[in-house]
Amino acid sequence: ARLSGTEDITVGTPIAGRGEAGLDNLVGMFVGTLVLRTEVSPHASFTELLADTRAADLAAFDNTDIPFERLVDALAPTRSTDHSPLFQVLLEFQNNQSAHLELPGL
C-alpha cells in the first residue's frame, strides 16, 4: 500500500474451475481467476492487517462461481491490452511433488 500509494490492494490468484457438476466427466484443466482485495488501513497493526486480509480472502472464495469476465463487465474498469483490468499482480502456489523415475534393472 505504501509503495503503490493506495489503500485498496488487489491481487489475482488462479482457482480450480470445476464447481459445475456438468464438468465432472470432461477431461482437462479448468481454471478461473479470483481477485483478492484488501483495504489497508495505515493505522492497523500487522496482526490486524493479516486478520482482515484472511477474512476478505475467505469471503472472496465464496464467490468463485462468478466468471472473471462477468466481474470485469460489472465493474467496468478502463480496459487496456497491456495489463489485467482488475489487478497487476497474480500469485500462484504449486504444491507438486518432485518427479521421481525408477527403472528397475537398469
Image (tube, grey):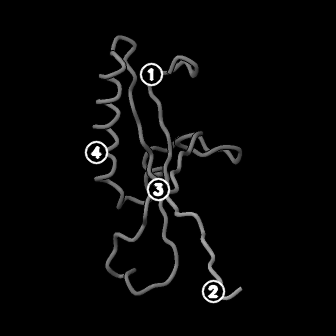
Mark 3 residue element:
helix
Which-is-in-front pick, marks 3 and 2? 2
| Side (left or right) of 79 relative to 63 | right
- In the image, which disc is placed on residue 70? none
Which-is-in-front pick, marks 2 and 4? 2
Q: Position of residue 53 (x, y in %)?
A: 35, 33
Which one is in front, 65 or 14? 14
- In the image, which disc is placed on residue 68? 3
Query: Which residue has dot 2 on it?
Result: 104
Answer whether labels 3 and 4 touch (C-beta < 8 Å): no
- In the image, which disc is placed on residue 59? 4
Residue drawn at point x = 34 percent, y = 42 percent: 57
Mark 4 residue element:
helix
Which one is in front, 17 or 74? 17
Q: Residues within 10 Å of mark 4 (few under 14, many from 20)?
A: few
Q: Amino acid at mark 1?
A: Glu
Q: Amino acid at mark 2?
A: Pro
